[in-house]
Amino acid sequence: MGDFKVRKIKNAKDSNKMYQQALQDIAVFEQMLQDDIFDNGDPKIGAEQEICIVNKELEPSQNALKLLDVIDDEHYTNELALFNLEINLEPLPLKDNCFSEMEGELLCLLSQGTEIARYYKDDLLLTGILPTLKYHHLQFDYMTPEHRYKTISDRLAELRGKDFDIYVQGVDEVIMSLGSVLFEACNTSFQLHLQIAPKDFVNQHNWSQMIAGPVLSACVNSPILFGNELWAETRIALFKQSLDTRSANKLYRKKLPRVYFGKDWLRNSPADLWKNDITRFPLLVTSDDFEDAELVYKNGGIPNLRGIRLHNGTTYTWNRMCYGFSEEQPHLRIECRYLPAGPTPIDEIANFAFWIGLMNAEPPKGIEFWKNIDFKTVKNNFIKSARYGLNTVFDWFGKNISAKELILNELLPLAKTGLVKRNISKKDIDKYLGVIENRVKAEVTGASWQVDNFRILADKYGQSIAQKELVRNMIKNQDKNIPVHEWENVNLEASLILNDVLQVEQFMTTDILTTNEADSLDLVRNILNWYNIHHLPVEDYDGNLVGLITDGLIERLDREFPELCSYAGDAMMTDFITINVKESIEKAINLMNLHHLSGLPVVYKEKLVGILTRRDLDKLPVDMKVRATQR
């Protein structure tokens, strides 16, 4: 999340001062470009690794700050949520064995963090979205207590004027609201950096946009959010909506979200990207220690341009320009932000090599290819790839072509050419492009592996068990650094599943039918009959659970008071037993046995979130049932 020495903008004068600083920075930046003082030499590469921390129940941990204190390594830093960490890898010259060197560093740093995490009964996982995330993990007590995060969250909420809403539709759909930006914390990425010479920046930036869709299609790893199967790379939709301050009040006015692919091709200068940001997006934060960029540059120094960089750090394009500075010479980079974390380090470095190879190859139609292509075509390719992964059909220079055919027949040879051009070792080229080739041939991405196994496990054992088993097996394969196309499917019977307390949410049914207290009792009778269920929760118009109707209760009322009951509210029980989502399955089984219940409504903050029935308990393997009743 960038610069931590920030504060809230106090008033209009304070805002104007920040604008003046940013505008001065842009003017100085343009002068620096004109004076050609940027590094035009051999490029370097770098990366940022975001990580999920899971506890012994395989759910989000809150131990980030504790782990950081013990790890005590400058490569590690915090992130927005207490269940995330970030590793900043060392920049390397783009040559020789740089990719295998980077994989070695990443494995070493991950091993260091994992050893300490496991001492505290936690674990580290590389994944685009943690499958076991739940809504209650996004409350304020999961936000890292850094002033910057709270300041940005409050300012975005102020601009929006209401809670942040997300609506993502895939095979399933998610509709939720939250009073902070913590939806953003669901996203975990592997961010790539490539140094670009200013004279090449316009064409290189446009090429990075062109290849974004095809590259992403082979790297998707974020298909499940809150137990729902959504996009192959759900992060793309979720990140956009998690920071969206636009209002529906101005229906006919076109406005950009703060997370976006781009508005058009870059046509003139790298500075145009910053001009767009300062023009279209309101300021979120400011600071008290800006330098006079004009004076620094006039006196022969390299200005840090902190004002515009601070603002740029609160806007989020998937291919973002970064300005680097040192005492000797400044440089420009493109940061590729759309790739997910995981599934394993070797997969990530293969993705990196694939992207770098393409970035260093000349586009098929020449470096100014973009002058003959509609930008919306490229944007549409990107969105489709996020939805469908390797099942995408791209519009590639006017020809419709499948992701598999495009990558194998055109892009991999192009990437190899780009890596050879940069004198990357043959061993690295063969190893990492080979991972991409085998992944695409097998048609197995992190997303497809998760979806295939989630469907099988959820059908047999329920959604929560499926989520946890995905995480358990992802950690196991990550430890062995096995590329995802070689992963075996989950074998639950061979797993050391659920050694800890079994919770209601692990077994409850969340796809539940309900009725309103004003609904016809005839409708209730038919619902119970049509779907062969025994319980129907009753809600009021605010979504609060106010009653419960059972088939046995209706039979008794029909027998004893046939003329008195016409509506659900007439027949429902208002004195009924519920159980909290976090209670143990042992308590649930005991309640059901004690009160001779065939089902229990499951609640969280007075809202119905599921129902636990005898059928759900039948999904437990025999040893689990014994364990639950013996606790």
Image: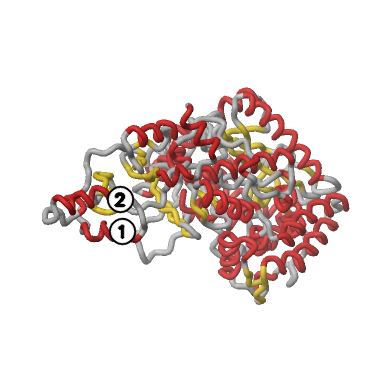
**Quadrant for the N terminus in the image:** top right
Looking at the picture, how far across and down is residue 403, in whole percent?
A: 67, 66
Q: Nearer the viewer, residue 414 or 159?
A: 414
Looking at the picture, how far across and down is residue 114, in whole percent?
A: 67, 31
In contact (CB < 8 Å): disc 2 and disc 1: yes
Q: Earlier in the sequence, mark 2 or mark 1?
A: 1
Q: Nearer the viewer, residue 475 or 499?
A: 499
Please, what secondary structure does the residue beneath circle 1 have?
Answer: helix
Q: Is residue 367 left or right of residue 153?
A: right
Q: Nearer the viewer, residue 138 or 287?
A: 138
Q: Is residue 583 left or right of residue 192?
A: left
- For image coordinates 20% across by 49% down, the residue present is 556
The amino acid sitting under disc 1 is Ile
The amino acid sitting under disc 2 is Leu
- For image coordinates 60% across by 42% down, the residue present is 471
Q: Is residue 427 above or below residue 103?
A: below
Instruction: Give the CA separation, mark 2 to mark 1.
Output: 8 Å
Disc 2 target residue: 536
Looking at the picture, how far across and down is residue 96, in whole percent?
A: 86, 47
Disc 1 target residue: 527
Query: Is residue 259 something that shows in the picture?
Result: yes
Q: Is residue 575 left or right of residue 345?
A: left
Q: Going by the picture, which residue comes out furthest to the bottom?
A: 398
Residue 345: image tag: none
Q: Going by the picture, which residue comes out furthest to the right?
A: 426
Looking at the picture, how far across and down is residue 295, in whole percent?
A: 60, 40
